[in-house]
Image: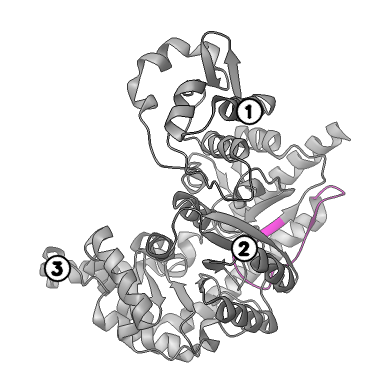
């Protein structure tokens, strides 16, 4: 088992090891019954003492994640039932370099009837017919597109269209400073693989986007989570932390943040940029939701204020157009972008040209009118979900009405066993996102994320009533 250890970090080695194994267990990479490496074997592979491994295993056993039997070893959860099978099945003992995989688990609930866990827009609200017709036309009239490798940087015509979009948002860059990626997730991954290495300090909002946490964890970064308030990331706290551990990178989703829905004020955006200048570090500005405002447009992007190239801006069109097409735009200064293009070329040999050309006409001609209609529909969905919470949520449950985006970030009383609630909800074919997965390590959250946009409207209302009734019954038994 490979675990990236930061021997100069703020956490001791037993804690780093227990958290790494705990993350693999919670995200399903280590299944129930899997036998863990022996204390001696893991100590040798990680080049630490056996005492260090014993402390880590003792902490995992204290938390109930593993069970150790003298003379037989340590196993994940109910190892007694599967001991013989797990020892014989060699792939489960084959080392990997994955520290956690929460994003994968977030999508692993396709069988539920009410998937509130998934931050997505229901197909009936997306322009799938328009994009599908364009794709069919391309296949029939330009089949050679399927025989052509896409440009590593992305289709030039699409980049020209993206250039206009970004300039209307105050980001004045030529198309040569843009790159098309397979969704913003690929953009995050490319930035991390290019600029983040083991032990580098990455600052993130607390809570943060699960997919970004997975990526930075995979690079062996030391992630430090910065609290937020109603104006976004606390830059005063971030500044003090940076004095102790200078940042290599700061990741933020400043507009209708995922998962909390909070929007960073313009004053804090400027202060964050000033901080990046003083420490000569990068900001990754992830922007999937800024077009989904309900009343007033969001503040200007951090990238629009950036005159020295500190911000890598990721603008996703996947969620709002066609998630299956996986289209996003990365905007960065030339020296930064050239290295990202090099990383992308080694990753995928260029994105599919067919999907880029399929979305191009809609983005060029129909996007703004469509976005206006979509905002109206989403606001209506949000207000209905909020009304249901006001009517049916039990005492002690709180939430903030978002100004845009797809989610409600709901806070439960401190005595609530969220994982037990999650198990019961799943039995009723209901899923939600536990807040714990929006942090790294063993930080515990009292929140859950509910998406009001992913289902047909009637299903959303029916499912939310069922969940709130379950929540009321669940809380009445523990009070």
**Which residue matches tag 3?**
140
Residue at x 71%, y 48% (from the top left corner): 445
Q: Nearer the viewer, residue 448 or 140?
A: 448
Q: Assign the N terminus to one quadrant of the image.
A: top left
Where does the image place residue 20, in percent across and percent down from the top left? 54, 39
Say few, some or many: other residues with alpha carbon within 10 Å of mark 1 (under 14 / 14 to 19 / 20 or more). some
SS for callout 1: helix
Tag of residue 404: none
Q: Nearer the viewer, mark 1 or mark 3?
A: 1
Can residue 38 be seen here? The reply is: no
In whole angstroms, how far apart are the C-alphas of marks 2 and 1?
Answer: 27 Å
Give the residues in magenta.
Answer: 393-409
The magenta stretch spans residue 120: no
Residue drawn at (60%, 19%) of the image: 67
Residue pointed to by mark 2: 245
Whether residue 223 sits left or right of residue 362 in the image: it is right
Percent across and percent down for residue 53 are 56, 28
Would you say 113 lies left or right of 91 here?
right
The answer to whether residue 87 of the structure is visible from this angle is yes
Badge 3 density bin: few <14, some 14–19, many ≥20, Cα 10 Å: few
Furthest residue in direction top, as rendered = 71
Q: CA distance from mark 1 to mark 3?
A: 63 Å
Residue wearing tag 1? 55
335 to 112, vertically: above or below: below
x, y percent for residue 462: 65, 49
Q: Are marks 3 and 2 in contact (CB under 8 Å)?
A: no
């Amino acid at each position: 088992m490979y675990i990236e250890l930061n021997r100069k970090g703020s956490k001791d080695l037993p804690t780093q090891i227990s958290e790494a194994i705990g993350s693999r267990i919670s995200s399903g990479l280590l299944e129930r019954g899997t036998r863990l490496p022996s204390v001696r074997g893991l100590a040798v592979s990680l080049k630490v003492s056996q005492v260090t491994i014993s402390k880590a295993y003792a902490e995992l056993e204290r938390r109930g994640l593993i069970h150790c039997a003298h003379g037989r070893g340590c196993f994940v959860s109910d190892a007694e039932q599967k001991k013989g099978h797990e020892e014989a099945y060699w792939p489960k003992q084959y080392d990997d370099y994955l520290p956690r995989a929460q994003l994968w688990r977030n999508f692993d609930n396709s069988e539920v009837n009410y998937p509130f866990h998934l931050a997505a827009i229901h197909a009936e609200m997306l322009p799938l017919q328009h994009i599908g017709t364009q794709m069919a036309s391309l296949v029939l009239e330009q089949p050679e597109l399927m025989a052509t490798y896409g440009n590593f940087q992305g289709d030039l015509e699409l980049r020209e269209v993206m250039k206009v979009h970004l300039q209307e948002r105050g980001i004045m860059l030529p198309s040569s400073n843009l790159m098309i990626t397979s969704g913003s997730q690929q953009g995050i991954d490319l930035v991390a693989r290019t600029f983040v290495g083991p032990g580098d300090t990455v600052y993130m909002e607390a809570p943060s986007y699960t997919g970004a946490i997975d990526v930075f964890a995979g690079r062996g970064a030391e992630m430090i989570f910065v609290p937020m308030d109603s104006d976004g990331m606390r830059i005063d706290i971030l500044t003090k932390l940076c004095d102790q551990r200078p940042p290599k990178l700061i990741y933020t989703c400043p507009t209708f943040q995922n998962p909390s829905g909070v929007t960073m004020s313009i004053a804090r955006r400027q202060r964050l940029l000033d901080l990046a200048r003083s420490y000569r570090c990068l900001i990754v500005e992830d922007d999937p939701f800024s077009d989904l405002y309900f009343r007033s447009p969001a503040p200007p992007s951090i990238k629009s204020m950036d005159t020295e190239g500190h911000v890598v801006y990721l603008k996703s069109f996947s969620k709002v157009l066609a998630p299956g097409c996986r289209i996003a735009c990365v905007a960065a200064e030339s020296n930064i972008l050239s290295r990202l293009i090099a990383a992308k070329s080694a990753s995928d040999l260029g994105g599919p040209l067919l999907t880029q050309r399929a979305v191009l006409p809609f983005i060029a001609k129909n996007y703004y009118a469509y976005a206006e209609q979509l905002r109206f529909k989403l606001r209506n969905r949000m207000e209905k979900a909020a009304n249901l919470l006001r009517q049916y949520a039990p005492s002690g449950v709180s939430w903030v009405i978002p100004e845009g985006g797809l989610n409600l970030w709901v806070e439960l009383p401190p005595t609530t066993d969220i994982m037990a609630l999650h198990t019961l909800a799943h039995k009723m074919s209901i899923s939600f996102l536990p807040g714990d997965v929006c942090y790294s390590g063993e930080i515990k959250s009292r929140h859950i994320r509910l998406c009001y946009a992913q289902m047909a409207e009637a299903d959303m209302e029916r499912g939310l009533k069922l969940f709130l009734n379950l929540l009321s019954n669940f809380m009445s038994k523990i009070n």
